[in-house]
Image (cartoon, rainbow, N blue to C red):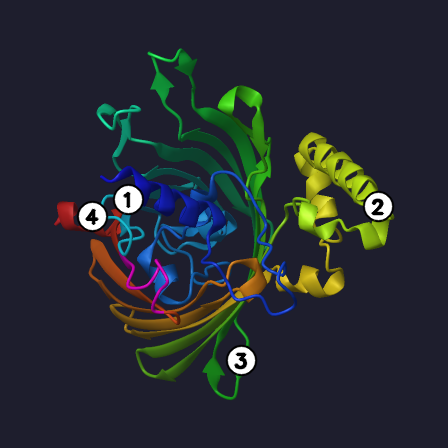
Amino acid sequence: MNTFLKRIAILAITLIALVATAQDGKNAFNPVQTGVTSLNIAPDARSASMGDLGAATDPDANSQYWNPSKYAFAYSNAAVSLSYTPWLRKLVNDIFLANLTGYIKLGSYDNQALSASLRYFSLGEVNTTDGAGYNTQSLNPYEMAVDLGYSRKLSDAYSMGVVFRYIYSDLGFSDSYAGDQTSGASAFAADISGFYNSYPIIGRNECQWTFGFNISNIGSKISYNNGEDIAFLPTNLRLGTAFTFPLADYHNLTLTADVNKLLVPTKPRMSDYTADEYGTDVDAQIAYLEDIEDWENMSSISGIYKSFYDAPGGLKEELQEIYWSLGAEYSYNQQFFLRAGYFNEHENKGNRKYFGFGAGFSLNVLRLDASYMLATAQTSPLDQTLRFTLTFDMDGLKELIGR
């Protein structure tokens, strides 16, 4: 794998954006910077096909990522799901995300569940060279996360869930000739979520209305380069709602929407500190260095609160940090599914804009889902991304074995 192309790929992942066209001045492009950005990649095909959403959709095996409190309302007693996503195929051909997740209901009252997942994001193969251009090492940088969750119904209509997560990011290398020894970075995080599920009657039809929230990746900061480079985890607030109504016997349509905001403080930029505001160029630089030091020393919890009011552009820029998704799912007899959705992020905060499409087929034992991403900009490295998810229903498997 060409190292130069690989660096381009890593940069694209880190920024999660293309170089956007600034609309409010030459310094308007200012995405929120975090570490372990692969945690923000949607793992499963069902949610990806509806525009990367899932806070309030029906529970499935992949609810661990979107809203783990949904597991308490899951229809099956247990399920396991495996997802695979080739990533940034327009740039390189060996980056991928693999995700294994599952849950099991606990007790005899159908009101609690235990869940777990494993995410593995591979950055492919990177070959390093010496000063003469000869290959010296072949590296395989990666990021992974392992988590365990618990969810419980607090009433017939409401549940909550918690998840505890261990994160490991290995993007460095060890150069034995130069004596440069780097190691991976670790962090711990937690999620807290809630899910409300109701069945209103509209006309003669029993519909379903749901609301969900998930605050994910609340935890320690992650430290790269032996503690010299510290980054915030991508702590995220997700809110969503969904409404399902019957079109006819066995035919249902679900409309759903999610909104998100990264709960991470904006990193100061020297370009935002001018002599006009601070008096002289020296005063502006001093103010910038002081704010950078405050940002580096800020705790992750303090960063969550500050993320609501620290954007250089004030309220207008804070609103730009909110990105949203709209999606729809048609189902026939809960066996055949068609899905579509749209994801939108402001130009100044990443400029990710794309449509999602997908389909699914469900049998007693397994379900296969696939999705396709179509970016609005043909130059986007996210364009034409495919995802595949295979889910095994343990109840269906038990019935099949018992026959």
> Circle 4 sits on which residue?
397
Amino acid type of disc 4?
A: Leu
Q: Is residue 141 left or right of residue 365?
A: right
> What percent of the width, then of the height, locates residue 140?
28, 30
Which residue position holds label 2? 280
Stretch in magenta: 378-387
Q: Are marks 1 and 2 in contact (CB under 8 Å)?
A: no
Q: Is residue 196 above or below residue 209?
A: above
Tell me which amino acid carries mark 2: Thr
Separation of residues labelled 3 and 4 (CA atoms): 34 Å
Query: In the rendered image, which residue does mark 1 sit on?
Result: 95
362 versus 113 height, above or below: below
Mark with earlier residue (3, 4): 3
Residue 5 among those drawn in magenta? no
> Label 4 to label 2, Cα distance in Å?
72 Å
Q: Comparing marks 4 and 2, which lies closer to the viewer?
A: 2
